[in-house]
Image: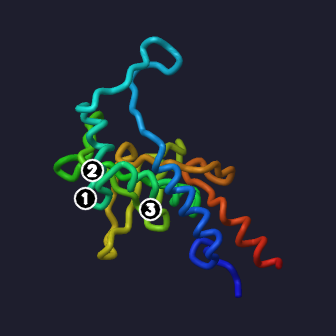
Amino acid sequence: DRVVDPFTQNTWVNAAISAKARNIAGVPFRLYTGKRGTDQKQLLADNDPWVLAFDRPSPLFPSWTDFIARVSAYLDRWGEAPIVLLGADGDMPVGSVPAELYLAEPNRIAEDVDRASQVLIGWRVQIGNGATQYLAAHAVVLVKELNLASLYRGASPLAPIAEAVDFD
């Protein structure tokens, strides 16, 4: 049998990714303002809107630890974690603080790139009912692993594992 998804097909891979995600979730998370490496860098106050947004990202992720554990697992499984930022009214105006943070499954999101300039202009997200929702580029933060084949997407670190297992 061909290994297509080592995370779901190999208990050791699943256990390793899950253990790493739990460990990362235990690391304290801090948000700063200012310039790194200077006296301008300051810890944001506990009541700062950005701190509050990350403390309780969304109804699906009631705490930062739940959210960051999932981000870590997405990175290890798919090589990317698309974080969708939503404002209070469901939109995400430029320069505003998100009301909720969600993760999109990487296989349900596609980049929209201006072909002439190669600039990312937005994202197309397949939602549960089969419809596609368009999000502006600033409404998605793509945390990703290095991918030399794409400027816009991450590369799964499990892809070589799947190929290696097939040779055994």
Mark 2 lies on residue: 100
**Could you give the CA–CA distance between mark 3 and mark 2, rounded to whole angstroms?**
18 Å
Q: Earlier in the sequence, mark 1 or mark 2?
A: 1
Give the structural element (helix, strand or loop) at label 1.
loop
Across and down, in percent, residue 27 comes to 48, 43
Contact (CB < 8 A) between labels 1 and 2?
A: yes
Q: Residues within 10 Å of mark 2 (few under 14, many from 20)?
A: many
Give the structural element (helix, strand or loop) at label 2.
strand
Q: Is residue 14 left or right of residue 40?
A: right
The N terminus lies in which quarter of the figure?
bottom right
- Residue type, label 1: Pro
Q: Tell which tag, 3 or 1, sits nearer the viewer.
A: 1
Q: Residues within 10 Å of mark 1 (few under 14, many from 20)?
A: few
Residue furthest right in the image? 168
Mark 3 lies on residue: 109
At 37% from the left and 24% from the top, the residue drawn is: 43
Q: Residues within 10 Å of mark 3 (few under 14, many from 20)?
A: some
